[in-house]
Amino acid sequence: MTASEMKNAILHHLVYTLGKDAAHAKTYDWRMALSFAVRDQIVDRWFEATRRTYAEHRKRVYYLSLEFLIGRLLKDAVINMRLEEAVQDALDALKIDWHELLEDEPDAALGNGGLGRLAACFMESQATLGLPAMGYGIRYEHGLFRQSFEDGRQVEEPEDWLSQTHAWEFVRPEVAIDIGFGGHVQEIGSRANWYPSEMLIAMAHDTPVIGWKGRWGNTLRLWESRPMHGFDLARFNRGDYAAAAEPEALARTLSRVLYPDDHTEQGKELRLKQEFFHTAASIRDIIRRFESEYDDLKLLPKKAAIQINDTHPAIAGPELVRILHDERGMDFEEAVGIARNTISYTNHTLLPEALETWGEARMGRLLPRHMQLIDRIDDLHRRETGTGHVNAHQDGKVHMGTLGFIMAHKVNGVAALHTELQKTTVFKDLHELHPDRIVNQTNGVTPRRWLLSCNPRLASLITEGIGDGWVDHAEDLEKIEPLVADPAWLDRYAAAKKANKVDLSNWIAETMEIGVDPDAIFDIQVKRIHEYKRQHLNLLETIAHWQEIRDNPNAGWVPRVKIFGGKAFPNYIYAKDMVRLANDMARVMNSDPLTSRYLKVVFPPNYNVSLAERLIPAADLSEQISTAGKEASGTGNMKLTLNGALTIGTLDGANVEIRELVGAENFFLFGMTAEEVMARRAEAGHAARAIAEDHRLARALEAIRSGIFSPDEPGRYHSITENLSHHDYFMVCSDFTDYWRAQREVDTAFTDPKDWARKAALNTARAGWFSSDRTIRGYMKDIWHTDAAPQVADAAE
Ligand code: B1N
């Protein structure tokens, strides 16, 4: 497409879709017009992919997830469709600022963190690989809350991405699926009819997901809940105005908000309803599509693979069995077999507080037939395995992890260490019964968004050196290794990083009024705020570092900018205290004339996908400091590595694999191993001992206690200091000394800029394996047993 064609397409949409005259069009109008013009380019390719999938009777992959953290889509679409030049030139001709349009797009935050972002990267990789696949999620009216700070405290405001038209979706009023809850069951022999007492409708909204070079397009289908019976006119006419609208409001509640839980199970009824609503609509849609092509349901596992993203859609097993057995008349055992061969389950965490359970009473009331089927599934599983001790329904609760496991042919962990720990902890008994079921699929991230799009300087430098094959064959990044030996090339690598840091410094100055030195180490910890992720370990080290600078301000300190980003779950008081402590520290330290040249603390509010794209390219140091054994994988760690940040980290999650690949000499390792953590935890008084043995740690804790950071309320962080001094489940104190040591190694390494650049470039060169393309290929081979389709011709540049 030429620039002038693009310009005409934009103007056409401006007038005929937006109904705006160019003279009066605002940023929003231009952005929408551009988005529609770009979308037009995608649609034919998207249709073509669908047509081929049907024509070739291909197996489809269905990715069921309560979260898709997709972020902005305009730039992604423009880049994958190779329309960058045409768009830039068209907008120049129209005198419209491209960056302003990009910034105007709301960030679709239909997820909490890594789990939801992984789903979004997977969608993009599936499209890039030409794998016929579909994502199913919920079209939350309000995504993850917007975070702001008041006096350093986190304040949550509703997020409103749908207050403007979502440019990328197509509404499908004809795809409307009835969903029932409650009511009673009438058993007829082994089968049953379920008569729900409450009904709603799931209506589909489709967003095309286009792969690299537009070679393939898949669909992200998001369900919106709608009332079955609309507005009650009779009631309204009787003057009962509020009551007339009530059923409608109630029905819509189901897709109203994303639960902000990240690794916590709140056990809320509405959440269970969301899970069933999402899963039942998706399963029905899958069966409907299957039956439009085939007439033998025994073929289902050959033609469909259903991946459940954690246990949130784990009711898929019983629901599929219910349809096959109750509604289609298939024998129960056969139905279970078919469901199992179709479904597979990804477990994302070992944290006990995140493992979902639902009380049998609630489950029985909302999903009476599913409750019966779960008992029969347990019963069958006991007969199959000859054991009685592992049941999904146990101690008055339904354990969704167990249910997910016994209803899946494969269960996967998300990093090598995590998968091994599954076998010895949460799924120990089940693993012994089914030793071939657990497999590993180490997470990955899409290099299109997480390098090509977010870091154009580095991306062009790489492409100039080795061509653009790395974009969809990220292992090719290793071809830059020979260039790393060339000092002139390394200078350019360092210059790209420096320019990214200057950009970020300018942004920090403009938005936060904090001046930071672009030559300082940009030390970044971005992720949800959680004790296991140990932002407080970072904060304690920052305090100790600050104190040493104050002791001796002229000792030639290596300047650092500590950057934090992340949201705390609204009811997680401890995590909110960590946020506030970071902000209190920032206030005190940034205005300390003795130290502020050497140490700054910056915590931009509302960390989201777009902010990640801004921060990650500017990072020198990636903080991956979770207590070993607690972070299943991490994906931010991969994004930072790819963008040439060196990691300071523990042997946890995918850090282990990152270190193996980039080389131990290019990674700052510290801390106890998962095994050592477990042993140390059993030792009484481990925290007190660690504090007694490290005067820096003792002094840092004392500083918090003294109220230096909260002079108006010295006891503000009492719960943090008390917890760390006595209980310290996450081993902050026990790992502090080694963390301090590693941080000083970082300082030393950074004083040799050439060697640092070399290490950074090697991180980029060796991070290609962390592409989600590799991950998806792994799922295809080991779990889904599917091939990619021959792809549509490349979009021309
Ligand atoms: O999933 C990511 C991993 O990279 C992270 O290590 C892992 O912590 C994350 C309940 C979760 N695990 N569990 C959740 C999210 C929401 C919720 O309601 C649990 N998120 C992860 C991708 O594999």
Image: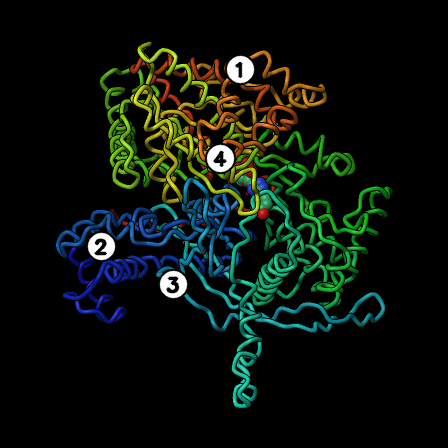
Label 3 vs 4, first from the N-terminus: 3
| Marks 1 and 3, how far apart at CA | 49 Å
Within-10-Å neighbours for mark 2: few <14, some 14–19, many 20+? some
What kind of residue is marked 2?
Met
Mark 3 falls on what kind of element?
A: helix
Find the distance from the CA under tag 3 to the CA under tag 2.
Answer: 31 Å
Q: Please tell me which of labels 2 and 4 falls first in the chain.
A: 2
- In front of the other: 18 or 556: 556
Q: Is the Cβ of the residue at disc 1 closer than 8 Å to that at disc 2?
A: no
Counting from the top left corner in percent of width and height, residue 8 is at 18, 62
Mark 1 lies on residue: 737
| Label 3 vs label 2, nearer the camera | 3
**Element at label 1:** helix
The percent coordinates of residue 509 (x first, y second) are: 26, 36
Q: Nearer the viewer, mark 1 or mark 3?
A: 1
Beta carbon of the mark 3 residue lies under 8 A of ligand 1: no
The CA distance from mark 3 to mark 4 is 40 Å
Quadrant of residue 508 within the rendered picture: top left
